[in-house]
Image (cartoon, helix red, strand yellow):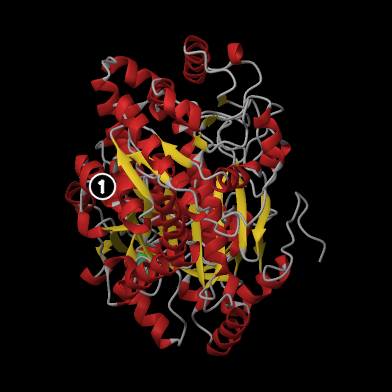
Amino acid sequence: MTETTGRYIILISIHGLIRGHDLELGRDADTGGQIKYVVELARALARHPDVWRVDLLTRQVMDPKVSPDYAERMEALADGAFIVRLPCGPRRYLRKEVLWPYLDGFTDQALQHVRRIGRLPDIVHSHYADAGYVGARLAALLGVPLIHTGHSLGRVKQQRLLEQGVRPEVIESQYNISQRIEAEELALDNAQLVIASTRQEVEEQYVLYDHYQPRRMEVIPPGVDLARFQPPGRGRFNPPIAETLARFLRYPRRPMILALSRPDERKNIATLVEAYAGRPGLRERANLVIVAGNRDDIASMERGPRQVLTRLLLQLDRHDLYGQVAYPKHHDPDDVPDLYRLAASLQGVFVNPALTEPFGLTLIEAAASGLPILATRDGGPRDILRACRNGRLMDPTDAAAMGRHLEEMLSDRAQWRRWSRSGVRGAVRHYAWEAHVEAYLRAVRRLLRGRRRGQELQARRTRLPTVDRIVVCALDNTLLGDDAAIEAFKSLLLASQRRVGFGVATGRSLRSALTELDRAGLPRPDLLLTSVGTEIHYGERLVPDEAWARLIDYRWEPEALRDAMGGLPGLRLQPKSQQGRFKLSYFVDEAKAPSRREIVRRLRQLDLHANVIQSRVMFLDLIPIRASKGLALRHVMVRWGIPPESVLVAASCGNDEDALQGNILGVVVHNHGPEIERLRGRPRIYFAENDHAWGIIEGIEYYDFLGEIRLPDEEGLER
Ligand code: GLC
């Protein structure tokens, strides 16, 4: 699919360690199922013919404690799929609970990334609360739809911890839970679509949120990389991990009860061990294999996993399970598919005893490997067993029942084979990534179709986040005034349109500016700063920048100002059409009117506040003290992350003065007002020798603004 027709999708998953090879799943609490999910989703989406490009944005980590892979700015995952690592706060690896203060910086980096790509994404898809916060802001800034996937929810966690008797202050200080929940609410507030893995997640978990809108939620079960997970062939299967297990087991060829999870309290490994230990028949018939992450020295691990593993060792010893239970210290990601396959070839069972399981990826992997499952009666497993019909559900707190189930499942060979076959079929039909991506893109198509029917979001689209540079022109006596010059300017702009934005900054009202632009046959600007920068509008649809209106409405008292000006000689109000909400404009009779300085002094003495701007002698504008063309332009540059060296301002009169200054590149046309003469000599303000738009073109050439962009030093440029 080409850039113009294919979809561009941005996925955001901020915390944990993400790379394209050898995922370090289980290394820490932040590097688990979600990481794997987003990497595979990115790859699977990129394989689809409708998709042009997928960028998975994550945090850049530069830390000697982790692999330098996580410091790479960009990593190709597949054809058209990339991991893009963005700086976010300190360089070192941080756990997700402490990332909150740095997320706004991440958003800014994401904006810069979009600019580098030069195209707006069709979709921003955030994963987990931290990315939800960033995604909500990014999607709002870009004016594109947000899809959110919660993965695990703060309110559910909070409830669970409270039930366990953890005090609210502790939950707060340890997990920053209210910030997380607030971010989730924000994401739900903004998302056009929430993708959940199971029905239960929608009905029992999202329901806890203020912004619970089930009609905007869609259950699309996670996909599984089925190429990696396949049933064993005939004959004896003897992968490398079998040797590791053999060190623990007296009879390694007995059926294997396999459990695979992080060493986390919630995964409830302890009850499984009790279930196994309590049934001598089961202990005779099968081995128990517990693969719970990697470890070097339990004593130096974090408290959570340390407690889980210590308890495991004590249980093994108490029940004297030596020779019957394996609990390898290390395994590679590549051992995981082998483990399922080995268990399947030994006619074993996969067991997931977790207290809750919203997702259950391991169950699908087991199913795809032809290994029947016994799983906790919770959301994920329920859906999976409904789809795959390959085992049983159980109460994870009832050790005796768990043991009974296992023994029964291992004794009925015919049933075991039916489960095994049915699991493989169900996994392919319901959980292949291809199926996930089809459902995903169907949902995306619906979203985007809705937008074209004129949703308010569409209107917010602007090219500003993707242009690479922008030319901002004053109208009267600058861009306008010479028809041949306008034509020349137009063809110059059109020739390089894709990456060059077009802006207008004028004293005229919006309406009158548009009339003039139409009359001159100029295109709709990407940016309109009108009424001397007191109003900002974006793009084709003239979307107003409302934040700007709020920002400048400070000490602005138009009635009092008008009264104060009323008594002055030589000043006449301009027609109503030239007055604005934030602009009070007069004609000046130079012979009679007081000077600008005198007017300013008078207003200050009356404790009135206005930016008083005189242009071409005859115009006088009063606007709020926080407004001007220059400030409006800076506001736009900050908002969209446009660096000053990428902005060329073409101007000719007093109200342009502050827009020309600073680090941006300025051009003053030859037919300029006298008030601006004093800027001559500044290295970044070029005084053209030609009038009107010919002067603008001269300035563009001077800086090579449509080419390499030459930046003058203090002496200016060699000509
Ligand atoms: C434009 C406006 C006018 C303003 C002048 C200077 O001509 O129409 O109202 O006073 O620019 O900013």
- Measured as percent of width and height from the top left, residue 78 is found at 65, 61
Q: Count how many numbered circles sit on residues in the image.
A: 1
Pointer 1: residues within 10 angstroms few (<14), some, or many (20+)?
some
Q: Please give the name of the residue rendered at 71% of the width and 72% of the height, measured from the top-left corner.
A: 701
| Front residue (pair 596, 657) | 657
Q: Is residue 565 visible?
A: yes
User: Which quadrant holds the C terminus?
Assistant: bottom right
Tell whether circle 1 marks a residue whose Cβ is less than 8 angstroms from ligand 1: no
Query: Circle 1 sits in a helix, a strand or a loop, which is it?
Result: helix
| Front residue (pair 46, 11) | 46
Image position of 650 with respect to 21: above or below? below
Image position of 394 with respect to 85: above or below? above
Q: Please give the name of the residue rendered at 27% of the width and 70% of the height, measured from the top-left corner.
A: 455
- Measured as percent of width and height from the top left, residue 492 is found at 62, 81
Ligand 1, seen in the image, is in the quarter at bottom left
- Measured as percent of width and height from the top left, residue 479 is found at 52, 76
